[in-house]
Structures are given as C-alpha cells and as structure tokens.
Amino acid sequence: MEIIDYYNEKKWCDKCGTYVRFLMSVDYSFCVNCGSRVRLFNEKDLKAFHRGLQQEKEAGKGKRRKTKAS
Ligand SMILES: [Zn+2]
C-alpha cells in the first residue's frame, strides 16, 4: 500500500544535500530537517531545467507544422 503525502513536493536543501520536505513561509521555504532555506532545484537540476526550456523553445521555432503521414 502506498501512502500519499499531503506535501509530496520536495525542494533542494544545500545543508542536507538532498531534496527535502519543506515548510512554506511568506517569502521562503525552509527545510523540515535543518531549517535552512531550500530552493526548487539544485545547481545541476536547475541547469537541466533551463536547458530543457531552451530546447523546447528551439524545437517550437522550427517545427511548427506537423508531418502528416497519409
Ligand atoms: Zn536541510
């Protein structure tokens, strides 16, 4: 049986070095383990995320028309 967390979203904690559950405050989110600020991604994933966006943009530019195989 799988337990579904109410907050299954996780953010990156530099101190813990992993994705953690977090507490939301007005401006920031905090790690539930150590209380330091957390971010949405770590450096590596952030780059990958941006690269992904870029690729999507690039792909969207050139490939507008669909190829119809009839
Ligand atoms: Zn932490």
Image (cartoon, rainbow, N blue to C red):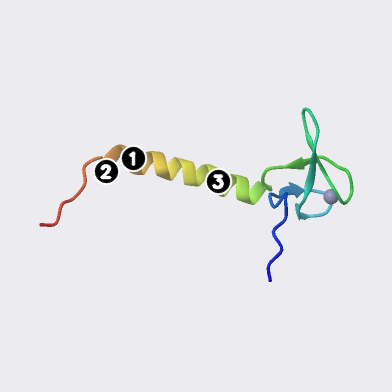
Q: Quadrant of the N terminus?
A: bottom right
The x, y position of residue 22, in whole percent, is 79, 45
- Which residue ends up furthest to the left in the rendered image? 70
Q: Residue at x 55, y 49 (%)?
A: 48
Q: CA–CA distance between discs 3 and 2?
A: 21 Å
Horizontal side of residue 57 vs 41, given as left or right? left
Nearer to me, 56 or 47: 56
- Relative placement, left or right, of 61 versus 55 is left
Q: Which mark is residue 63?
A: 2
* Dot 3 or dot 1, earlier in sequence: 3
Residue at x-position 85% and y-position 48%: 32
| Left or right of 29 in this view: 34 | right
Q: CA distance from mark 3 to mark 1?
A: 16 Å
Three-letter code, disc 2: Lys
Image quarter (top left, top right, bottom left or bottom right) of the C terminus? bottom left
| Residue at mark 3 | 49
Instruction: Give x and y (percent) for residue 9.
Output: 68, 49
Q: Nearer the viewer, residue 45 or 40?
A: 40
Please tell me whether mark 1 sits on a helix, a strand or a loop.
helix
Marks 2,1: beta carbons within 8 A: yes
Q: Hey, what amino acid is under mark 1? A: Gly
Give 52 or 70, whichever is nearer the viewer.
70
* Mark 3 surroundings within 10 Å by alpha-carbon count, few (fewer than 14), some (14 through 19), many (20 or more): few
N-term-proximal mark, 3 vs 2: 3
User: Label 1 neighbourhood size at 10 Å, few (<14), some (14-19), many (20+)?
Assistant: few
Q: Which residue is mark 1?
A: 60
